[in-house]
Image: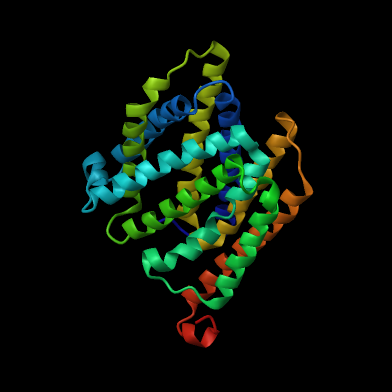
C-alpha cells in the first residue's frame, strides 16, 4: 500500500487540473475547425490504449480488470462520460472556456443533490442550503431573461448534469467493482461507442493540427495518470477542493489565447458556486467522519 502524503497529493491535484485545462484549451482549438465527434473519437482511441496498457501491468492483467458483475452499469457509465465530453467540447466552441467552466463547476452541487435519490445518502439541511445558494450563482452566470433561455447557455449545464450522474454511477459501481475495473470499462466502452459514431463525421486534418491532436491525446493520458497517482497518496476528500483550480487555469487560457472576456456576472456567479461547492465537500467530509451524525445537527 502506498504511504499517504497529503501535501504531495495536493500538488498532484494542482498539476492534474493544469493538464486537464490544457486539454480543454486544445479541444476548444480543434473543435473550432473540425467536427467534435471526430475529435473525441481520436482522443478516446488513445485513452483506451492507455487504459489497456495500465490494465496489463496490474495483477491479473486485462482479464482481471474487465471482470465485473455489473457490465450494463459499467457500459452505461462509459457511454455517459463519452457523451458528456462531446457536449462539453461543444460548449467550449459555443461559449468559450471561461463561461463553460464557470457553469460546469456546479457539478459537485448536482452530485450532492442527486446522491439521495440515486445512492440513498442523506443530505442535511445545511448542504441543501448550500446547494440552493450555489444554483443562485449559476443563475447569476446565466443572467435570467438574457441567456437562460439560450440553448448555448444550457449546454455546459447539461454537461455538468451528465458528469454528476457519471460520478454517482461510479460510486454505485464501486460497491462491487474496483477502481481499476471501472477505469477499464470507462475507456474501452467509450472508445467503442465513439468509433461507431465518429467515422461518419471524419474530416481531413492538416499536419499542424495532427500535432495538436497528438498533444490532446498526451495531455489526456498524463492528466489521468496524475489523477491516479494523486488518489494513491492522498484521500479524495483532502484534495478535491483543489480541483476547482481547473476553472482558474481554463479561464486563463481563454483570456490569453482565445480573446475571451471575463464579465462581472461570471466572476460573481463562479465565486458563489465554488464557495457553495467547497462547503458541501467540507460538510460531507465532516458528516462521514462523525461517529454520531445526529449530534452534528445536519440531520
The answer to whether one can see residue 5 in this image is no
Give 7 or 141, whichever is nearer the viewer: 141
In percent of the image, x 69 and y 51: which residue is there?
145
* Count of number-bearing discs: 0
Residue 28 sits above or below residue 286 on the image: above
- The answer to which quarter of the image holds residue 283 is bottom right
Question: In the image, 173: left or right of 215?
Answer: left
Residue 203 image offset from top left, x and y in percent: 47, 16
Residue 2 image offset from top left, x and y in percent: 43, 55
In percent of the image, x 42 and y 39: which residue is there?
83
- The answer to which quarter of the image holds residue 26 is top right
Residue 211 image offset from top left, x and y in percent: 54, 19
Give 178 or 40, whichever is nearer the viewer: 40
For the N terminus, the quadrant is bottom left
Give 160 or 5, whichever is nearer the viewer: 160
Q: How is the image coloured?
A: rainbow
Residue 182 image offset from top left, x and y in percent: 33, 48
Residue 236 sits above or below residue 157 on the image: below
The answer to whether one can see residue 45 in this image is yes
Q: Residue furthest bottom?
A: 295
In percent of the image, x 58 and y 49: which residue is there?
104
Amino acid at each position: 500500500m502506498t504511504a499517504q502524503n497529503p501535501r504531495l497529493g495536493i500538488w498532484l491535484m494542482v498539476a492534474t487540473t493544469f493538464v486537464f485545462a490544457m486539454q480543454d484549451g486544445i479541444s476548444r482549438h480543434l473543435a473550432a475547425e473540425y467536427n467534435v465527434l471526430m475529435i473525441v473519437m481520436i482522443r478516446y482511441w488513445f485513452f483506451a490504449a492507455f487504459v489497456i496498457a495500465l490494465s496489463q501491468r496490474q495483477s491479473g492483467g486485462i482479464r482481471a480488470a474487465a471482470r465485473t458483475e455489473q457490465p450494463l452499469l459499467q457500459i452505461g457509465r462509459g457511454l455517459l462520460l463519452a457523451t458528456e465530453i462531446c457536449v462539453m467540447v461543444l460548449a467550449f466552441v459555443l461559449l468559450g472556456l471561461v463561461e463553460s467552466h464557470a457553469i460546469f463547476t456546479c457539478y459537485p452541487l448536482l452530485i450532492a443533490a442527486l446522491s439521495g435519490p440515486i445512492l440513498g445518502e442523506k443530505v442535511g439541511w445545511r448542504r441543501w442550503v448550500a446547494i440552493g445558494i450555489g444554483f443562485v450563482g449559476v443563475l447569476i452566470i446565466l443572467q435570467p431573461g438574457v441567456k437562460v433561455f439560450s440553448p448555448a447557455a444550457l449546454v455546459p449545464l447539461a454537461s455538468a448534469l451528465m458528469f454528476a450522474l457519471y460520478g454517482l454511477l461510479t460510486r454505485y459501481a464501486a460497491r462491487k467493482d474496483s477502481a481499476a475495473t471501472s477505469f477499464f470499462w470507462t475507456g474501452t466502452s467509450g472508445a467503442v461507442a465513439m468509433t461507431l459514431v465518429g467515422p461518419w463525421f471524419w474530416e481531413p486534418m492538416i499536419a499542424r493540427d495532427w500535432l495538436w491532436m497528438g498533444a490532446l491525446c498526451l495531455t489526456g493520458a498524463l492528466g489521468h495518470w496524475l489523477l491516479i497517482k494523486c488518489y494513491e497518496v492522498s484521500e479524495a476528500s483532502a484534495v478535491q477542493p483543489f480541483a476547482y483550480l481547473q476553472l482558474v487555469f481554463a479561464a486563463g487560457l481563454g483570456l490569453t489565447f482565445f480573446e475571451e472576456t471575463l464579465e462581472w456576472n461570471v466572476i460573481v456567479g463562479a465565486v458563489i458556486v465554488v464557495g457553495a461547492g467547497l462547503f458541501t465537500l467540507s460538510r460531507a467530509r465532516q458528516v462521514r467522519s462523525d461517529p454520531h451524525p445526529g449530534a452534528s445537527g445536519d440531520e
